[in-house]
Amino acid sequence: MEQLNLSESEWRKRLTPEQYHVLREAGTERAFSGRYNDNKADGLYRCAACQLELFDSVDKYDSGSGWPSFTRPIAPDRVVEHADNSHGMRRVEARCARCDGHLGHVFPDGPPPTGLRYCMNSVSLDFRSRTGNANGANADPSGA
């Protein structure tokens, strides 16, 4: 996969301040504040920084955590996992394989078939409806 490597100033021009904080500085949005936490629409979730397709809505579930949660990425090569020992915790960080943007974390407490919970920040994602118009415009995240 071709990598997208931009300078920090280019990332700042491309992303909103909140997106920059999460995607480039490994920040986290507040629980239950993200636009995709309750999204029930059918479609694909892409990286908000580079538009790489990451997750399918068929693998999304309500974990009760306050962040959009998935059992797996679309393909194993789309999300890269790294050990994250920050904040006195041992976690697994999930990053976009194309642009190295921070997406969230992976936990071993998800439902079958994987037993994993890809707990993602809404601000790091861009949703595209499968049933929307032909140009792939964003669907209403409420699923209405």
Image (cartoon, rainbow, N blue to C red):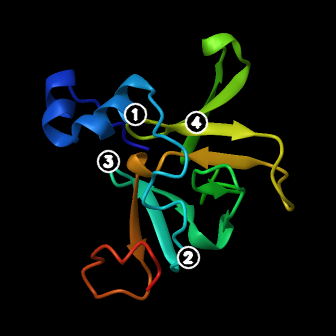
Q: Are marks 3 and 1 in contact (CB under 8 Å)?
A: no
Label 3, label 1: how far apart the Cα atoms are:
14 Å
Q: Position of residue 41 (x, y in %)?
A: 51, 79
Label 2, label 1: how far apart the Cα atoms are:
23 Å
* Label 4 sits on residue: 80
Which sits earlier in the primary sequence, circle 4 or circle 2? Answer: 2
Q: Which mark is residue 22?
A: 1
Which sits earlier in the primary sequence, circle 3 or circle 1? Answer: 1
The three-letter amino acid code for the residue at tag 3 is: Cys
Q: Which mark is residue 122?
A: none
Q: Position of residue 65 (x, y in %)?
A: 67, 49
Label 1, label 4: how far apart the Cα atoms are:
16 Å
Mark 3 vs mark 2, foreground winner is 2
* Label 3 sits on residue: 50
The three-letter amino acid code for the residue at tag 4 is: Val
Mark 2: secondary structure = loop
The three-letter amino acid code for the residue at tag 1 is: Val
Mark 1 vs mark 4, foreground winner is 1
Mark 3 vs mark 1, foreground winner is 1
The quarter of the picture where residue 128 lies is bottom left
**How many neighbours does mark 2 have within 10 angstroms: few (below 14), some (14-19), or many (20 or more)?**
some
The three-letter amino acid code for the residue at tag 2 is: Lys
* Label 2 sits on residue: 40
In the image, is 69 to the left or to the right of 102? right
Q: Are marks 1 and 4 in contact (CB under 8 Å)?
A: no
Q: Residue at x 17, y 41 (%)?
A: 14
